[in-house]
Amino acid sequence: MGRVQSLPDNVINHIAAGEVVERPASVVKELVENALDAQARSIHVTAQGGGIELIQVDDDGIGMDADDATHCFERHATSKLRTLSDLESLATMGFRGEALPSIAAVSRLQMTSRCAADMAGTRVVIEGGRVDGVETCGAPLGTSFRIADLFYNTPARRKFLKSPATESGHIVQSFTALALTSAEVHMTLRLNGRLHTQAAPAKSLGERFDMIFGAGLQDQLLDIEHVEDDLQVTGLIARATFHRATRRQQFFFVNQRPVQSRALSQALYDAYRTLLPRDRHPVVCLFLTLPPGEVDVNVHPAKLEVRFRRERHIYDCIRRLMIRRLEETLTGPPVDAPAFESASPAARPVPMMWGTAAAPAPSRTMVGASPIPPAEASIAPPVPAASASSPQPAVTGASSPGVDGERHEGLDFHTGYPAEGNAVLDGQPLGQLHETYLLVQYPDGVFIVDQHAAHERVVYERLVAKMQASLAESQHLLFPVNIDLSGVDPDWLEACLPRLTSFGFALEPFGGHTYRMHSVPALLAERDHAAALMDVLDVLRTPNADEAPEHAATGVPSVLHRVVTVMACHGAIRAGQRLQEAEMRGLLRDLARTPRPFTCPHGRPVLVNVALSDIEKTFLRR
């Protein structure tokens, strides 16, 4: 019938390009991997316009002669495989032979290469998959790729790319991962004509980390080393007291190849379970070396995902290894080993609690005490308008009694919350439990209030109200602080400075990658404002951060919600911080004034209700 026909080569190449070249960062990844496979000792990457306008990768590897320089653009042409059995012993990053023809099919490409045996090099020019010219030319040893106008001939793909700043962020992430795989290779990245990252050959992975992410970071990292019969694990994990707002500093490598693995990620989070505050993420850079036959790297077109033959064994080994390393450095109460040994949250024993919710385990991060900022009644945000998806407010009258006999205006609670919540206003604080929870007695029982979560809610609402009214308060630092922002795109940061100023951070360039911070948000003046700044930058750099819709629960822009949540977490009182009775009363009063007093901005419960009737039943009084 003639209905089944072979596709033309140009269509085949475009289909392959759709699988391999997802975005400009995919091009950078493939070309840098090829350079590393070519034994390069120096690799330089340049990108313009998020890599859409231009990507250039220069290396000093072994290069190619004239025949190889033209042959490498044919589909499935590769120097890394010869027979089917070679798939069982892969020792290179690239191997499929689809990358170069796929890239050439959707760009204007120029490659220049020379090997040591030749006096002259070869230049190949390809446009949209069509070879426009091959010529002999002068060239240094190695290979240079120049990729211009990516996706110029596939407008449907190009329109789905994000902004140049977002695409640059993906390039930085891909480049960073590859720079960590080869600490001995000199690697640089330039974005829009400015040097972004310069990683000279390093003596250790920790030193490489400092070069990429900022001086002093390796002091927060712990070495990991483990060898068994067929598995070697090396790398770095962060101390339990050091964590980030996003997963941007999590890297896994299998046989030197950057990968994504659910098993490795699950092992990481299970190891840190109970050690990190909610919505905080550990830092990790882990290298696994195992026989090629134990891992399948051919399950994803871009070689991003891997499959382990003994996945459960790998998971258990990595989790136990991390737990042991963390236990060696933890301070305070000993780690609860049974909680770690559970493979999943569902398998962990849960303490018996009365009431509507179980209180979360306190963070082991202990911070010195500092006074709670005074209440600001004039800044209390209004209760948002009711909608079909939000509980209807129940008006309690013009005023309600406060915890200290005062009467406060506008203390309305939502009927969607437990009715006992109103009793917080009349409750009598009995004191602190483990300097982390407030015990509040009321006629029908007792509330257990998480002081950090409660203060987070108070600070969050206060900040949102001020920022929406453009009234953010900043504190001028008596001694300005110098911060190394090596891992941040300088063009993006320069464009972001006005936004940071609106949050209360005042920065100015101070040479190279160093910035001088003159002012910080007022509530962070006594906190680690440098760490808070890094977390805010992580949130703002998250891909599509500004394109997300409004936060469903608050109605504020999603990116503002996330930034303010980070700032509130840094600015709130901590678990383990002793409070005076007046501070307890003030915190409860401020909590009652918020429109959502029963959860913190992360969604954790603020309080647990232990009913007196349940207590009496437990003691057989009823």
Image: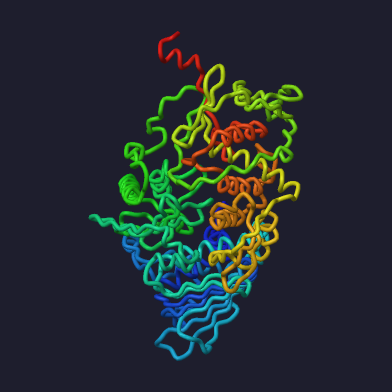
Looking at the image, which residue is at 63% across and 42% down?
459
The answer to which of 512 and 262 lies nearer the viewer is 512
Looking at the image, which residue is at 44% across and 13% down?
617
The answer to which of 253 and 348 lies nearer the viewer is 348
Instruction: From the top left corner, tell me how far across and down residue 359 is, in percent.
Output: 48, 31
User: Image height check: is 359 above or below 116?
Assistant: above
The answer to which of 322 and 359 lies nearer the viewer is 359
Instruction: From the top left corner, tell me how far across and down residue 58 is, in percent.
Output: 51, 77
The image quadrant of residue 388 is top right
User: Image height check: is 359 above or below 109?
Assistant: above
Looking at the image, which residue is at 69% across and 51% down?
473
Q: Residue furthest bottom?
A: 119
Q: Residue furthest top?
A: 622
Instruction: From the top left corner, tell me how far across and down residue 317 is, in percent.
Output: 31, 48
The C terminus lies in which quarter of the figure? top left
Q: Residue furthest left?
A: 229
The answer to which of 438 and 422 lies nearer the viewer is 438
Residue 162: in sight, yes or no?
no
User: Image height check: is 535 above or below 89?
Assistant: above
